[in-house]
Amino acid sequence: MIQRFLKILTIVFTYLVNPAYTQVIWQENFSVPEKGIQGDETGGIISDFSGITQWNLEYHDISLDNPGDYAKTVSTSGGRFEACDIDGEVIWYSEWIDISSCEKVMVELTASETGSGANQTTKYLKAFFQLDHKQEVPFHKNHESKGNWGSNPVVAEGLKGESLRIICRISTHYSSDKVILDNLMVISDIGPLPPVKPFDIVINELMPDPYPPVELPNAEFIELLNNSNYPVCTKNWKLRINHISKNIQSNWIAPGECLLLCATGALNELKPYGQASNVVGFQGLPNRGAQIDILDEKGNLIDHIEYSSTWYDHHEKENGGWSLERIDPFRHCHQKENWQASQHPDGGTPGTSNSVMANNPDLISPWIKWAVPVSDNELELLFSEPLDILKLQEKENYSLGILGNPDKIILSSATKINLHFKKSFQENKIYTLEIFNLTDECSNPLFQNHCKIQRNNIEPYDILINELLFNPFPGGKDYVEIYNPSAKLIDMSRLLLATRDKQLQPDRVSKLTNQRKIWKPKCYLALTTDTHAVFPWFFIPDTCNFLQLEQMPPFPNTEGYVLLLNEKMQIIDEFYYQEKMHSPFLGDVEGIALERVSFTSNTNAPGNWQSASAWSGYGTPGYENSQAASEATGKPQITFIPEAFSPNQDGFKDNYIIRYKLGKSGFVANIKIFDASGRFVQHLAKNEILGTFGEFIWNGEDETGSRLQPGVYVVTMEIFHANGEIHRFKDGVVLTEKW
């Protein structure tokens, strides 16, 4: 660390004398320990190079007799590569390093050893380099370190080419001796200090709420990290918190180093943790969250975050004393996923590496949350995360069929824009908006490059009320299901749900959502205030067909009104329900939904609502009703299969199945099973509400759940309707043990 700091001071001093510097273009400090090879108890070799991309190791004809023999990275002195008692030679290779843009480069490394061994043929580090895949060339200074040499700086300079590779041959034969490779740097020749680019300096750690302190001082701070390969000066830079700017004092931040920004009163408390600088007039960090910007001397945005207390994702740490740490300093998008509460026992890591630091690239593509017309010639687009602002504002990146590119783009934020077109949209015409070249801030392309949009008015019966649960089980919740029979793309934020008061005026009007969610034609949508109080009671094939409302009108158990309104408060559909609409054969209607039978009949037409079938679980929220009208079939169709079954769970004819398809809703079924002597053994259905289609399954058990003996059994089925219609069916089936 001291050697690195002295090197940084040299770089800074060079710049102060002459506006130039020595640029580190590649380095390896072996900060990740336990990467390489080591022996095991049996004399075998264990290797681990996971996550290593900058170097590799070649090893042949070596002997690692026990776990104390190795050639690997260790955590000593902040990280280094060591070889210990390898009885042979390993060859360390760097990756191929691009030096094509450099006039001249210099390579530095440190070759060290410990122990008393002085044999120059078995204890050494020999350093070579390759240019442009040509032959190996020895380093110019100390290319061979042999025997008992202590520590040598090894240097190659004046190199020029397209690519460079470093090669180190290492040997040591004694358990008490180590050969050490460390501090590899490839440095360009002196040149002008480059301008600071966005994200060269990043906000790396925050302490918004230091009280009650864990082990750190009771002081708020913002930690800046230099991500670049050159020193950066903060002279005339600004810290902006919630649009209030304060001057940052002039400080040099070395490559890979940090600067702590704080209030004047906290400066002395934070100095022991690293380089610290007070910001005069520092207004503090709001506990719940704020927008923080770092601006250079020209007002250019260098880094920006909008943190929130929700980033902690840990209730206890959110209450104070713990910092928020950046996971990956090289990731600049989708910020919430790149921050976490500190895991360090002190409560934070000011001035040192973050406790949560890890490779955390953003590989998730952004998507369009909505694209909806908001006027005759204006579209509003919302994206799932911030996008590249420059690309967002290019008109050529959008095309709307015959309307072409937008005439104007209004940027509300990096996630929301409005596109204005010269010509108006035709009502009810579906356009395809094509989008090109958009990426998020980490260059992930947009997930989809087109979407459908439609300017429309929501007219009566464009949407229909299709199902209602008004008397749920205890712990359950009401739901209303609606259906879109039209060809319109419906913006859910334009819809409202209501009931009527005693004067029959619309009452308890509730907006479905403030989000512009698009609802496609021929789709179902179930509305409730708590999906978790609905899902356990019913079969839910697709949870996406649910919308959870913040509030919903009450629907009494005896009777009431369900109103569906558009944004102009016009009634789109209305259902007056009564408890007596349920099947008269039901003793208790708690937990049973009313289902619409026909979309073509008037909502309140007699007979257009039936109790949901038992087979469906007494409700079908989010999908087709069990009582939905089907094509007229005349006499009910009943199918009994198979002729024989063996309930031995071998996957072949394990159950006896009765399938039905009825011409209308409202039937009730009784199904009884008798043995060959006429004795009753099972009541498969008892006054059970049927849908327009479904099935019953018999697994060969009696009413007590006991397996019946093999033999012939008789099945009788009777279905009847409240209008007096009765149908009877009979079948025989063989129950056998096996085929």
Image (tube, rainbow, N blue to C red):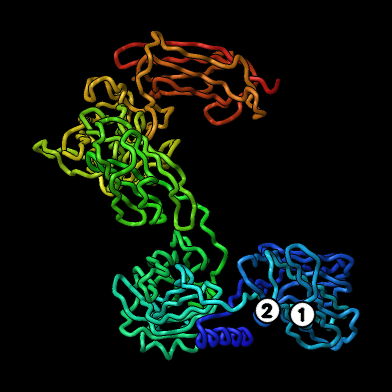
The crowding category of the residue bearing disc 2, from other C-alpha atoms within 10 Å (few below 14, some 14 to 19, many at least 20), is some
249 vs 243, nearest the viewer: 249
Residue 386 visible to an observer of this rendering: no
Q: Give the left or right position of residue 339, taking residue 580 as reference.
A: right
208 vs 331, nearest the viewer: 331
658 vs 185, nearest the viewer: 185
Quarter assignment of residue 173: bottom right
Q: Position of residue 733 (x, y in %)?
A: 59, 15
The structure residue drawn at horizontal position 44% and vertical position 54%, both measured from the top left corner, is: 440
Q: Give the left or right position of residue 66, taking residue 423 as reference.
A: right
The crowding category of the residue bearing disc 1, from other C-alpha atoms within 10 Å (few below 14, some 14 to 19, many at least 20), is some
Quarter assignment of residue 265: bottom left
* Distance from Cα at disc 1 to Cα at disc 2: 17 Å
The disc, 1 or 2, on the residue closer to the chain's N-terminal end is: 1
Residue 73 visible to an observer of this rendering: yes
What is the secondary structure assignment of the residue under circle 2? Answer: strand
Q: Position of residue 693 (x, y in %)?
A: 43, 20
Q: Is residue 588 above or below residue 411?
A: above
Residue at numbered disc 2: 183
Residue type highlighted by circle 2: Asn
The structure residue drawn at horizontal position 71% and vertical position 20%, both measured from the top left corner, is: 739
Say which mark, if any, is on residue 140. Answer: 1
Residue type highlighted by circle 1: His
Q: Give the left or right position of residue 503, taking residue 471 as reference.
A: left
